[in-house]
Amino acid sequence: MDFELSDEQRLLRDTVREFAAGEVAPVAADLDASKRFPYELVEKMGGLGLMGIPFPAEYGGGGADTLSYALAVEELARVDSSVAITMAAHTSLGTMPIHLFGDDEQRDEWLPQLCSGRRLAAFGLTEPEAGSDAGNTRTRAALDGEEWVIDGAKQFITNSGTDISACVTVTARTGEDEISNLIVPNGTPGYEVGEPYRKMGWNASDTRPLSFDGCRVPAANLLGPRGQGFKQFLQILDGGRIGVAAMGLGLAQGALDEALAYARERRAFGRPISKFQTIQAKIADIATEIEAARLLTYRAATLKDRGEPFTLTAAQAKLKTGRLAVRAAEEAVQIHGGYGYIEEYPVCRFYRDAKILTIGEGTDEVQQMVIARALGC
């Protein structure tokens, strides 16, 4: 297996790394503290082509592969998870369903504005009683002439309530035993976006509940064939897990970066604490796990790009990197000592941001179930 990145992939990685260090890092703490959505950064990412990396050039996308997309997410999460999830959720959850399952008219209408980053897309799957049990969707859509009438509620939806949010693709029960996906434009009567949640982390990202009360959309807003929604969103979640795995990988690497820099600078008993065996052991363990997790994440992306089965590897990567992010952030805080508990230090934010990576896009327990089933259990 070739473990080397292509010249194009290295160029993209280095471009995003430079952007993250020069544009995101200086404002990340302020965005987190003020809970302010990073409109200016999204605009700049759109200008760099980061909001449409895996989509065809004919729609304004980058025409790149999944591994390139994962590299970009990793580099953003290395500095700030709120910015990374804004890009990742827009790409793999919000825009990808339209790209994969939309017809020509739907793609022509939505993809150019979404690939450019001028507008954001969201994916509405989770409900109060349908999280891990996504097949238990209660939201309903009834066909009335040439319109679908949607009633229900969604929760924990990213990118749905910003000033540049364009649409949300929602799962809805269109029959007793069938689920379909429907595109709902922002501003549609009967579609209400709730107030943003007060969260432990990802404070600069947009996460809200949604409600639908007699919300009417054209029949043409059905995404793909009627009744294919369950199959569609399972495919979307498989791909989305690669993005979330890249986020966990990036956060872990960022935590290690901060821990190394601090350990080399902080002195105790007359020498840098990086010279103490206990600190070295922590750093060595995390660094080794990061390299293993990176190979697993990149393999999942590569399998997807080759058109080979990747469900198992994506679930393994998501499980591994989420847990690693939590551990790496915790060890980075520990290495910082009391300063790790102070908001001025990035590791404090990393620690708060890490936990959701074991929950979102399928909990660790769901990943274990997916893995076990793939192994024949």
Image (spheres, rainbow, N blue to C red):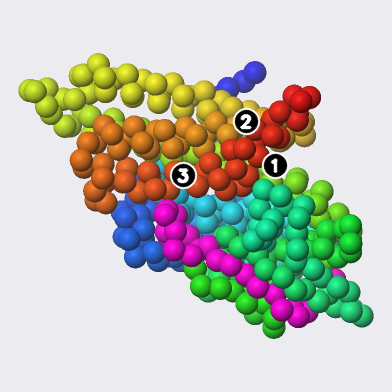
Vertical relation: 32 (above or below) 352: below
- What's the residue type where badge 3 is placed? Lys
Q: Residue furthest toward the top? A: 277
Between the C-alphas of marks 2 and 1, the distance is 11 Å
Q: Which residue is mark 1?
A: 238
Q: Could you tell me residue 359's position as x and y percent?
A: 55, 45
Determine the secondary structure under disc 3: helix
Contact, mark 3 vs mark 2 (Cβ under 8 Å): no
Q: Could you tell me residue 269's position as x and y percent?
A: 8, 23
Q: Which residues are magenta?
A: 197-220
Image quadrant holding the N terminus, namely: top right
- 273 on left or right of 107: left
- What's the residue type where badge 1 is placed? Asp
Residue name at image x 61 percent, y 63 percent: 155
Q: Quadrant of residue 128?
A: bottom right
Q: Which residue is mark 3?
A: 355
Determine the secondary structure under disc 2: helix
Residue name at image x 87 percent, y 58 percent: 178
Contact, mark 2 vs mark 1 (Cβ under 8 Å): no
Numbered tag placed on residue 316 in the rendering: 2
- Crowding near pointer 1: few (<14 within 10 Å), some, many (20+)? many
Residue closer to the observer: 57 or 272: 272
- What's the residue type where badge 2 is placed? Gln
Determine the secondary structure under disc 1: helix
Does the stretch in magenta take in 203? yes
- Crowding near pointer 3: few (<14 within 10 Å), some, many (20+)? some
- 87 on left or right of 199: right
Vertical relation: 93 (above or below) 333: below
